């Protein structure tokens, strides 16, 4: 976009010209930044919105029975959370026996499910809920129970038989884990996982029942170059996927053990992956543990707000009968849930990051935006955000605002301001006035510090117009605008690649200042087709390697206002 974005046209949304203009803008961005993962929308109609529900794992692990499942299903309804969209009850690992019956079928553990699985499914359905189940793409589940995949050394897989069994029970949702996947001699792990998950997709296609497919494959490659390859192919088979570490589970021996650091870690690894997501294909940052032991109410607000800003699946995993009224009010907040369930399905853009806060902006489908500010520090902070901080440059820009926690509204705000408690997150919906103009596609450009890094505070580096990728400080040098012709602007200058070097120069529109962005995350110079590379020595352009960590960048999410 130009440095001074044009004012929003006043064409009403019902007008055909409105739709034509919006489509034209989308086609421009698709051409400049393709592939961006958005084409998967029509191929996966099963989950047009991020799935919501409950799963036993993060609270109970294997310590559950049929009664546990049904008590939580009932609590989901009685609490009113089911009516807010949490409508799928999923059983995780340990439900089956370690061996199959004489016909090769899975067998439910008779101690946990004395009447088998089908009556449990029927009871869940009778509550007006959907039912989900767990299996594994390997020969054994992570808990050592019977899996669907090939045995070690090769042999018969059971994807088709198991899919038929699940369909006969009335299963609506399948979580397929990735432990113990067999790779034949000479076969890569990436190829073995793809073969297994493709086989599950084919099996589900055969059973004649719509079953939402949750894939765990990417989580087994986090930190390795193949992570990005797996993230590129899972969207062809399932509707959502886990791409990183499990969230911290409840420990009954230490029930008050803090778990917020785990929430922050999952948020940090999920946020840069917006390019892989679109309606029907969802990045899954793992369970919502807000309201359970180990998280304060402020931390519960943060998890729900951040997951909603990322359009992540909202799958509760706690003892629902023990949730307090305050936690239920947070988790059932309709205004925040509407941000998660927005049909546009965009992940938020990281506008700014400092050692204590993140500022996020997310485009919504109805001309509004959601803004969230996370206070990750142990101290309270006061935040003020101007229109320019949010990417609006129109003269006298004002917007109507609604605080999604309190409901407080302001019809003529020029600044968003809030006092934010430690580990809390403020969240608003805003509707900019026509005088604000269209927002710049603005925010931080980041890369992962190390593929094997597991520290949330230093996981992400920010591209700086000073010539480095460094620890994020929130300075103006880390604020970038991506223009429609592929330029990267910061501080009124453009990132320029020439003779292997990268410099900031006055913006001229020449080829050396134009970049192409691909699905993996490479920024490729249009002048020499080399990749922007960030190392300790600084920035350069080098031959594009295969998923090199130093060459993979996350750009501000592409949002378009009419």
Image (tube, rainbow, N blue to C red):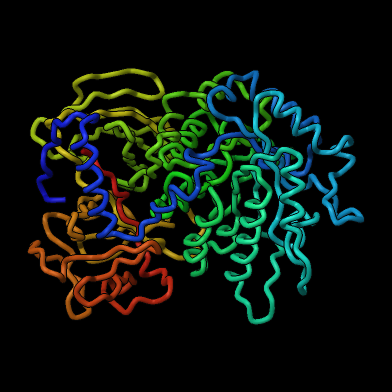
Left or right of 496 on screen, residue 470: right
Q: Nearer the viewer, residue 458 or 56?
A: 56
Quadrant the C terminus occupies: top left
Most extreme residue toward the right is 102
Q: Nearer the viewer, residue 69 or 133?
A: 133
Residue 70 sits in quarter: top right
Residue located at (9% from left, 45% from top)? 4
Left or right of 152 on screen, residue 328: left
Q: Position of residue 138 (x, y in %)?
A: 71, 62
Residue located at (22% from left, 42% from top)? 20
Q: Is residue 435 above or below residue 148?
A: above
Count of all numbered marks drawn on residues in the image = 0
Q: Position of residue 303 (x, y in %)?
A: 49, 37
Residue 543 sits in quarter: bottom left
Q: Is residue 254 visible?
A: no
Q: Position of residue 200 (x, y in %)?
A: 65, 57
Residue 463 sits in quarter: bottom left
Q: Position of residue 259 (x, y in %)?
A: 58, 41
Residue located at (53% from left, 45% from top)? 261
Q: Nearer the viewer, residue 247 or 399?
A: 399
Q: Is residue 553 visible?
A: yes
Q: Is residue 283 above or below residue 338?
A: below
């Amino acid at each position: 976009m130009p440095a001074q974005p044009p004012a929003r046209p006043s064409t009403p949304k019902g007008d055909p010209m409105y739709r034509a203009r919006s489509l034209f803008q989308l086609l421009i961005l698709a051409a400049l930044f393709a592939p961006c993962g958005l084409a998967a929308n029509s191929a996966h109609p099963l989950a047009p919105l991020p799935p919501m529900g409950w799963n036993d794992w993060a609270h109970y692990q294997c310590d559950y029975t049929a009664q546990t499942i049904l008590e939580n299903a009932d609590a989901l309804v009685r609490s009113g959370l089911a009516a807010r969209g949490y409508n799928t009850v999923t059983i995780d690992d340990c439900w089956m026996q370690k061996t199959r019956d004489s016909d090769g079928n899975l067998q439910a553990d008779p101690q946990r499910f004395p009447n088998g699985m089908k009556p449990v499914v029927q009871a869940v359905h009778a509550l007006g809920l959907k039912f989900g189940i767990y299996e594994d793409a390997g020969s054994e589940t992570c808990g050592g129970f019977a899996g669907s995949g090939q045995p070690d050394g090769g042999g018969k897989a059971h994807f088709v038989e198991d899919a038929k069994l699940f369909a006969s029970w009335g299963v609506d949702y399948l979580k397929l884990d990735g432990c113990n996947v067999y790779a034949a001699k000479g076969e890569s792990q990436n190829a073995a996982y793809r073969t297994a998950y493709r086989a599950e997709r084919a099996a589900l296609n055969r059973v004649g029942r719509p079953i939402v497919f949750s894939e765990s494959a990417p989580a087994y490659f986090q930190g390795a170059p193949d992570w990005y390859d797996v993230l590129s192919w899972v969207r062809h088979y399932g509707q959502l996927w886990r791409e990183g570490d499990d969230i911290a589970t409840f420990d009954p021996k230490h029930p008050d053990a803090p778990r917020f650091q785990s929430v922050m870690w999952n948020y940090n690894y999920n946020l840069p992956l917006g390019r892989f997501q679109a309606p029907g294909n969802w990045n899954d940052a793992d369970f919502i543990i807000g309201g359970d032991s180990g998280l304060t109410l402020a931390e519960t607000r943060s998890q729900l707000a951040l997951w909603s800003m990322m359009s992540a699946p909202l799958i509760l995993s706690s003892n629902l009968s023990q949730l307090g009224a305050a936690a239920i009010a947070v988790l059932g907040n309709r205004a925040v849930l509407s941000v998660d369930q927005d049909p546009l399905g965009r992940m938020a853009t990281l506008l700014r990051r400092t050692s204590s806060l993140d500022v996020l902006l997310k485009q919504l489908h109805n001309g509004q935006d959601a803004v969230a500010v996370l206070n990750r520090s142990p101290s309270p902070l006061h935040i003020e955000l101007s229109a320019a901080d949010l990417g609006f440059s129109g003269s006298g820009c004002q917007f109507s605002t609604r605080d999604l926690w309190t409901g407080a509204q302001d019809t003529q705000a020029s600044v968003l301001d809030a006092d934010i408690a430690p580990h809390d997150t403020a969240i608003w919906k805003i509707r900019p006035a026509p005088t604000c103009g269209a927002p710049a596609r603005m925010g931080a450009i980041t890369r992962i510090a190390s593929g094997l890094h597991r520290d949330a505070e230093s996981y992400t580096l920010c591209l700086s117009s000073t010539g480095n990728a460094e620890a994020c400080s929130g300075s103006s040098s880390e604020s970038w605008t991506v223009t429609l012709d592929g330029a990267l602007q910061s501080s009124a200058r453009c990132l320029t690649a020439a003779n292997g070097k990268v410099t900031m120069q006055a913006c001229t529109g020449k080829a050396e200042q134009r970049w192409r962005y691909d699905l993996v995350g490479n920024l490729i110079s249009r002048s020499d087709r080399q990749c922007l590379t960030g190392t300790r020595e600084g920035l350069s352009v080098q031959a594009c390697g295969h998923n090199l960590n130093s060459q993979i960048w996350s750009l501000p999410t592409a949002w378009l206002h009419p």
